[in-house]
Image: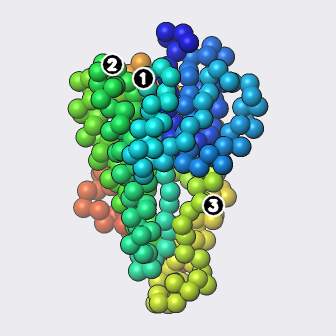
Amino acid sequence: MSVDQKVVLITGCSSGIGLSLAVRLASDTGKAFKVYATMRNLAKKKRLLESVKGLHQDTLEILQMDVTDRQSILNARDKVVEKRVDILVCNAGVGLMGPLEVQSLDSMRHILEVNLLGTIQTIQVFLSDMKAQGQGQILVTGSTGGLHGLPFNEVYCASKFAIEGVCESLAVLLQHFNIRVSLIECGPVNSDFLVNLQRAELGDACLQQVDGQTLSLYEKYMQHCSTVFQNAAQDTEDIVKVFLDAIHSTNPAFRYFTNSVMPPLTKLKVTEPDGMKYIKAMSKIIFADEDQ
């Protein structure tokens, strides 16, 4: 391995952004990166292996790692041959959609354990070594759902809002150790995230306890989501380009927006801090007929 080669560890590589980023970095023509692509379930590594077609045996390793299991994270760290990680990418995440009344405590805990505590736990395991090295980079897959609230996504947004606070707090501290923290703020992405989403479906028994008006609004929200994903979702390759901008930057920003500009609704929250204009604007976008 070249002394200049960067060691990268990425979580959530069985599909989507993690898979695409792992393939892109491992395929670098100058072999600038040694990539450790991790996933909770190694039975899902087939797609990643098919994507690299065996061409990157010296720049890619696939490791089992469950971000909700500290011992699993430690085991993955111990398998990093170079005994260091220069770039840590916390990408593993899950979603939860539906009326808040029907969400079980277990399902809510799971979202927080993966999206929030899983990210924190992963950073904890690698942070001491990065500090000792006196350099490093931590990239976290953020979400516009961490910047503004989305109806029927209360717990998911809570987990992503919390990640914003974690990363911002760390960024203030870690600049003193020459460790850069960046959030890659994604909107809708064409990936398996929507397929893997824990979602209450219309007709599910759990929705029988929900009032009619909420069900009507939920149906409208699901139609809105479908339209947005059909018309505005980005491909994972578009997201990977933003990650690469951050990785290649000599002075990476704290926050990157994958569509290159701050979403207008997020800007509205900053310019109108009492929050009412944002709430009315989001409601109008999603529930236009109801708000007339």
Most foreground residue, 112 or 129? 129
Residue marked by disc 2 = 133
Secondary structure state at the residue bearing disc 1: loop
Who comes first in sequence, dot 3 or dot 2?
2
Q: Going 52% across and 90% down the picture, which residue do you hit?
A: 208
Q: Going 48% across and 48% down the picture, which residue do you hit?
A: 66
Secondary structure state at the residue bearing disc 2: helix
Residue marked by disc 3 = 195
Relative horizontal placement of residue 127, taking residue 285 as reference (left or right): left
Question: In the rendered view, would you say 30 is above or below 275?
Answer: above
**Amino acid residing under circle 1:** Arg
Relative horizontal placement of residue 47, taking residue 176 as reference (left or right): right
* Whether residue 96 is visible: yes
Who comes first in sequence, dot 1 or dot 2?
1
Question: In the rendered view, would you say 20 is above or below 34?
Answer: below
Residue 6: x and y, percent? 49, 19
What is the quadrant of the N terminus in the image?
A: top right
Q: Nearer the viewer, mark 1 or mark 3?
A: 1
- Cβ–Cβ under 8 Å for marks 1 and 3: no
Spatial CA span between label 3 and label 2: 39 Å
* Whether residue 286 is visible: no
Instruction: Examine the image and state in which quarter residue 108 appears.
Output: bottom left
Instruction: Examine the image and state in which quarter residue 132 appears.
Output: top left
- Cβ–Cβ under 8 Å for marks 3 and 2: no
**Amino acid residing under circle 2:** Gln
Residue marked by disc 1 = 84
**Amino acid residing under circle 3:** Val
Q: Nearer the viewer, mark 3 or mark 2?
A: 2
